[in-house]
Image (cartoon, grey):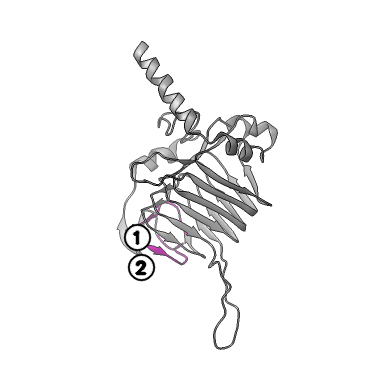
């Protein structure tokens, strides 16, 4: 028991020293006092730019926990980047609806749009997301490494013959319980229904709302395949009503935390 307690203390101290406390206090200062006093957002090796952008937690006060959001934490050996997370709050709104974790080597760029993360998202790392319009992500997202999500072309474009401007910004909607595999790219105008899986290295660039539940969407450009799979762990998570994927000093909490019969 003594040695076990020593190991817990050492593990906790190592975690504490990993936190970028200066930027943790800076980003939590953007929240209302009743939320920020718990330090619900922890950032790691971060680069934080705060201009006119806003950040908010759309969470019941009773569900606010210390460390319920961990941004830039290295939690997978697949990600070798020595950087944590870059958060650019230029303008727009960044909304979190529950707990989640984003791994190291990642960036969040708020460029006048709105980004909404549902509860219980788990992102391995090297993740890049940028919004000039709106990106909404449902609950229980599972996202592998080297994934990019952009609702903009970043540059204004025109048709070369008649000079007519082209649509460069279109909203993205990602449903609940979606699994995005490594090196996938999600572009403007994409709609993904609940329970779909995005194959590795796919270029996802249109509305897939007609995909059946548990369909795989894959390819360059991505197409709906007549293959159906369901991840057992996401099935468990989706049935738990009060479960936080991460909180406190735990990287990933137990599946049974908050479970209801």
Classify 197 as above or below 28. below
Q: Position of residue 140 (x, y in %)?
A: 46, 44
Classify 170 as above or below 5. below
- Residue at x 60% of width, y 82% of height: 164
- Residue at x 53% of width, y 49% of height: 86
In this rendering, position of residue 146 left or right of residue 115:
left
How far apart, in angstroms, are the residues tagged by discs 1 and 2? 8 Å
Answer with mark 1 or mark 2, whichever residue precedes in sequence. Answer: 1
Element assignment for label 1: loop
Q: Which mark is residue 201?
A: 1
Q: Position of residue 45 (x, y in %)?
A: 50, 41
Q: In which quadrant will I find the N terminus?
A: top left
Outermost residue toward the top?
2
Q: Label 2 belongs to which residue?
A: 220
Total marks shown come to: 2
Q: Position of residue 138 (x, y in %)?
A: 50, 49
Classify 260 as above or below 115. above
The reply to whether the magenta stretch includes residue 222 is no
Element assignment for label 2: loop
Span shown in magenta: 192-211
133 or 240: nearer the eye?
Answer: 133
Q: Can residue 175 be spotted in the picture?
A: yes
Q: Residues within 10 Å of mark 1 (few under 14, many from 20)?
A: some
- Residue at x 34% of width, y 48% of height: 230
């Amino acid at each position: 028991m003594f040695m076990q307690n020593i190991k817990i203390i050492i593990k906790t101290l190592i975690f504490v020293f990993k936190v970028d406390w200066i930027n943790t206090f800076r980003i939590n200062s953007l929240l209302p006092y009743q939320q920020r006093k718990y330090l619900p957002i922890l950032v790691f090796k971060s680069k934080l730019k705060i201009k006119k952008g806003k950040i908010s937690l759309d969470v019941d006060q009773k569900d606010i926990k210390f460390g319920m959001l961990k941004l830039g934490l290295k939690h997978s050996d697949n990600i070798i980047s020595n950087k944590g997370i870059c958060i650019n709050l230029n303008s727009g709104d960044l909304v979190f609806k529950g707990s989640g974790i984003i791994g190291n080597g990642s960036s969040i760029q708020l460029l006048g749009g709105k980004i909404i993360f549902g509860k219980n998202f788990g992102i391995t790392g090297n993740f890049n997301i940028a919004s000039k319009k709106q990106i909404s992500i449902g609950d229980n997202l599972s996202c592998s490494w080297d994934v990019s999500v952009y609702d903009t072309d970043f540059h204004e474009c025109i048709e070369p013959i008649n000079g007519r401007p082209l649509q460069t910004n279109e909203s993205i909607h990602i449903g609940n319980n979606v699994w995005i595999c490594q090196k996938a790219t999600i572009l403007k105008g994409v709609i993904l229904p609940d329970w779909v899986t995005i194959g590795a290295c796919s270029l996802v660039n249109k509305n897939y709302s007609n995909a059946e539940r548990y369909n795989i969407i894959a390819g360059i450009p991505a197409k709906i395949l007549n293959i159906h799979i369901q991840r057992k762990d996401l099935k468990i998570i989706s049935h738990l009503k009060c479960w936080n994927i991460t909180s406190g000093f735990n990287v990933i909490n137990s599946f049974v935390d908050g479970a209801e019969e």
